[in-house]
Image (tube, rainbow, N blue to C red):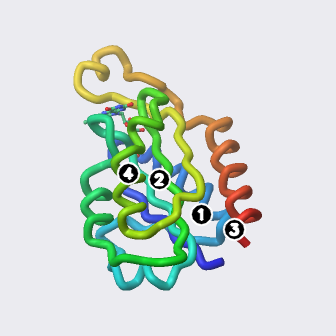
Amino acid sequence: MKSLIVCFSYHHNNTQKIAEVMAKMLDAQVKPPEEVSPEELLQFDLVGFGSGIYGEKYHEHLLEFVDRLLHVTNKKAFIFSTSSMEEAVKNHLLLREKLKSKGYTIVDEFNCRGFNTNSFLKLFGGLNKGRPNADDLKHAKEFAMNLAISNK
Ligand SMILES: Cc1cc2nc3c(=O)[nH]c(=O)nc-3n(C[C@H](O)[C@H](O)[C@H](O)COP(=O)(O)O)c2cc1C
């Protein structure tokens, strides 16, 4: 199974850390959206889409990238995020729907907490310091291992 991970991570590189652990298990590369063309994506059977959560949704760069994707059949995707709060169901809704409308089957979803120093939070040392931590990375690794096994 040929896999790729498309990840936009900028605030503290929290999601990038998760992406890299997953990539190792899936023998995949991690690329930012601006380095992937919609045509290139067609050669992969499984694509992971990840970013931090901003204003209760995935980052605009990732959402706009998905808007440009070509329609596919028989392609699988997984989505993953880091965020201040664990509200993955709500925060994942828009990306999930966009990918489904492009023809992707969402096989699984992952979320964990990420360090957040947005706005006034930095005055108090930020939220979720140290996240993702070793446990989060372990969960990400297990998540990707399951994907590798169940999508062989
Ligand atoms: C401008 C901004 C808006 C954010 N909005 C949310 C939000 O709506 N919900 C949430 O749970 N976390 C929010 N966060 C926290 C980020 O999702 C969290 O820090 C994430 O781990 C950042 O990922 P990154 O380092 O990969 O960019 C926000 C952070 C920033 C900087």
- Mark 2: which amino acid? Gln
Q: Disc 2, ligand 1: is the CB inside 8 Å?
A: yes
Callout 2 touching callout 4 (CB < 8 Å): yes
Q: Amino acid at mark 1?
A: Ala
Q: Tell me, yes or no, if residue 29 can be seen here.
A: no
Q: From where the camera sits, is residue 39 visible?
A: yes
Cβ atoms at labels 3 and 1 below 8 Å apart: no
Q: Secondary structure at mark 4?
A: loop
| Label 2 element class | helix
For disc 3, the neighbor class at 10 Å (few under 14, some 14 to 19, many from 20) is few
Earlier along the polypeptide chain: callout 3 or callout 1? 1
Asked if the residue at tag 3 contacts the one at tag 4, i.e. Cβ–Cβ closer than 8 Å, the answer is no
Q: How far apart, in angstroms, are the residues tagged by discs 2 and 3?
A: 23 Å
Q: Which mark is residue 9?
A: 4
Ligand 1 placement by image quarter: top left
Q: Which residue is mark 1?
A: 23
Dot 3 amino acid type: Asn
Q: Of tags 3 and 1, which is closer to the observer? A: 3
Give the position of the C terminus as an image quadrant.
Answer: bottom right
Number of marks: 4
Q: CA distance from mark 3 to mark 1?
A: 15 Å
Q: Position of residue 90 (x, y in %)?
A: 40, 35
Identify the residue position indicated by label 3 in the image: 151
In three-dimensional space, the C-alpha distance between marks 1 and 2, rounded to whole angstroms, equals 10 Å
Circle 1 packing at 10 Å, graded few (<14), some (14-19), many (20+), is many
For mark 1, give the secondary structure.
helix
Q: CA distance from mark 4 to mark 3?
A: 26 Å
Three-letter code for the amino acid on which mark 4 is drawn: Ser
The residue pinned by badge 2 equals 16
